[in-house]
Image (cartoon, rainbow, N blue to C red):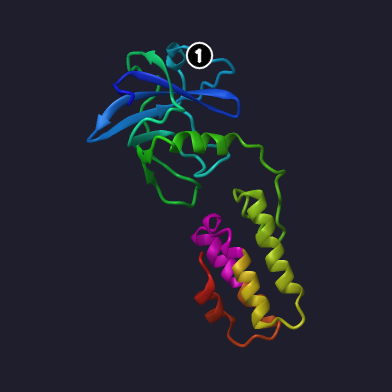
Amino acid sequence: MTRVAIGDVYAFTAARRWVPCQVIGRRGDDWLVVVFAALAVKRPTAKIVDGAPIYVLRHGRPRNEPLYLACDGPLPASYVRLGRRPVDLAFALPKTYRTSPRAGEDTLPVPATWAYAPDRVVDDLTKRPPPFHSRRFPRWTTVDARALRAIDTAVAKLAAARPVTLAALRRAIAATNRHADEIDTIRAEELFETLEKIARRGGLADPAAVIDAQRDW
């Protein structure tokens, strides 16, 4: 088992690039680890962390999360030790972050396994589909394009039903449930009102109870 120490610099690969990180401290049994936004095509030296900025998730989930982690468990073989450097960060360690302007604050460091950072960076670097702008939900600008398209399509199918049946409403709710992690409180209220309005207009007597009972958002 690899012995970890404060100051150790490691790197893992994501999207054919080397992503460095450093062990900056200890909290109980957890190692405090910072991942840096200093990607390299070839294997770097430990000096790559000198003056480097922290890696912040911009496209993956959870969006806007700085990769400042409290890692537990054994160090995976996917981490390659580059050496050791003094812990001398070029930034103040963040204590909180928000995934969106309307979301509440999440605290840092994030409790995680060592596998968390590689998984998140791979997701962050994965090519995204072109943006999708919904006419029905124009304010949902930060929702994943694939999720927004699927939600928009589900609502449009319900609106096109003549008449709106209970089965059609349930199918629409089930389709939106697949993307519940994209639907915050404000979006949930808007989606609820939209589905209820469409269902009532289509002939259902009490759609609110059905929506409330079957939604996951």
For the N terminus, the quadrant is: top left
Q: Quadrant of residue 31?
A: top left
Q: Residue at x 44, y 17 (%)?
A: 49
Examine the rendered structure and indicate whether residue 50 appears above or below residue 213. above
Q: Is residue 108 visible?
A: no
Q: Residue at x 62, y 37 (%)?
A: 126
Report the span colored magenta: 176-193
At which x and y percent is residue 169? 64, 76
At which x and y percent is residue 144? 62, 49
**Looking at this view, is 144 or 175 the one in front?**
175
Characterize the magenta stretch by its predominant secondary structure: helix
Q: Is residue 6 visible?
A: yes
Residue 182 within the magenta-colored segment of the rendering = yes
Residue assigned mark 1: 44
Residue 173 within the magenta-colored segment of the rendering = no
Q: Residue at x 52, y 44 (%)?
A: 61
At which x and y percent is residue 28? 22, 35
**Looking at this view, is 24 or 3 the one in front?**
3
Q: Quadrant of residue 163?
A: bottom right
Q: Residues within 10 Å of mark 1 (few under 14, many from 20)?
A: some
Query: Residue extending furthest left?
Result: 28
Q: Is residue 140 left or right of residue 18?
A: right
Q: Amino acid at mark 1?
A: Pro
Q: Secondary structure at mark 1?
A: loop
**Looking at this view, is 173 or 135 the one in front?**
173
